[in-house]
Amino acid sequence: QTPSKLTSISKFLSLVLRHQPEKIGLALDASGWARVDDLLQKMEAAGQPLSREALRELVNASDKKRFALNDDETLIRANQGHSIDVDLDLPVITPPAVLYHGTASRFVESILSGGLDRRARHHVHLTEDVSTAVAVGTRYGDPVLLRIDAARMASLGHQFRCSANGVWLVEGVPPEFIERV
Ligand code: HQG
């Protein structure tokens, strides 16, 4: 597969595994898993045929490890980023003391006064990695890096979870924990 073809298939998988499974008539269970057989059959019917091997390669090669297969490779789900109601069953764990969020400059005033909201997603997405945060912010414009005092948030009872691909998830970040870097 060419890189652009892989990207387009990955985007299609994100669409049906995170946002609109009904678009191809796919069923997800309460934890967001779809049957691989069902997915491949529905993708073929939707004019996006994909072999089992190509799917496995895409899952393994994906830069951000967006998708996970279960042990016997009969089930697949998105690791994070859902807008539909799924429960990923991720445990609450202690975060690193400092996490980062990258956003676009036009959002900063609103974020510093009202905090970070989850918007269309289930959670606010945070990262340990400055360069990842900057890349995420660049998607929406001129990037701004925000430093989050995760240690203090956790000590005050905010619940942090970490997705299988290392994205830190929290329901919201009030402004007092946010500092523009
Ligand atoms: C902003 C990609 C104004 C927030 C990335 C962000 C990430 C506010 C945007 C993942 C706000 C939401 C998530 C407030 C939040 N006022 N703006 N109060 N609160 N915002 O895409 O974090 O490719 O839903 O700063 O790599 O940008 O999907 O979240 O700019 O990991 O795998 O509202 O998406 O991963 O945008 O990105 P998003 P995000 P995938």
Image (cartoon, rainbow, N blue to C red):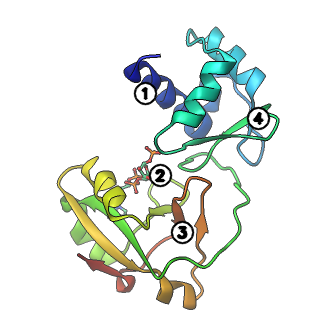
Amino acid identity at mark 2: Ala
Question: Label 2 CB, ligand 1: below 8 Å?
Answer: yes
Q: Earlier in the sequence, mark 1 or mark 4?
A: 1
Amino acid identity at mark 4: Leu
Q: Which of marks 1 and 3 is nearer the N terminus?
A: 1
Q: Which of marks 1 and 2 is nearer the N terminus?
A: 1
Looking at the image, residue 178 sits to the left or right of residue 15; the answer is left
Q: Residues within 10 Å of mark 1 (few under 14, many from 20)?
A: some
Q: Residue 92 or 19: which is nearer the viewer?
A: 92
Mark in the foreground, 4 or 2: 4
According to the picture, the residue beneath numbered tag 1 turns out to be 7
According to the picture, the residue beneath numbered tag 2 turns out to be 120
Disc 1 is placed on an element classified as helix
CB-based contact (under 8 Å), mark 1 and mark 3: no
According to the picture, the residue beneath numbered tag 3 turns out to be 171
Q: Which of marks 2 and 3 is nearer the N terminus?
A: 2
Looking at the image, residue 142 sits to the left or right of residue 71; the answer is left
Q: Is residue 145 visible?
A: yes
Residue positioned 19% across, 61% down in the render: 105
According to the picture, the residue beneath numbered tag 4 turns out to be 75
Residue positioned 58% across, 40% down in the render: 18
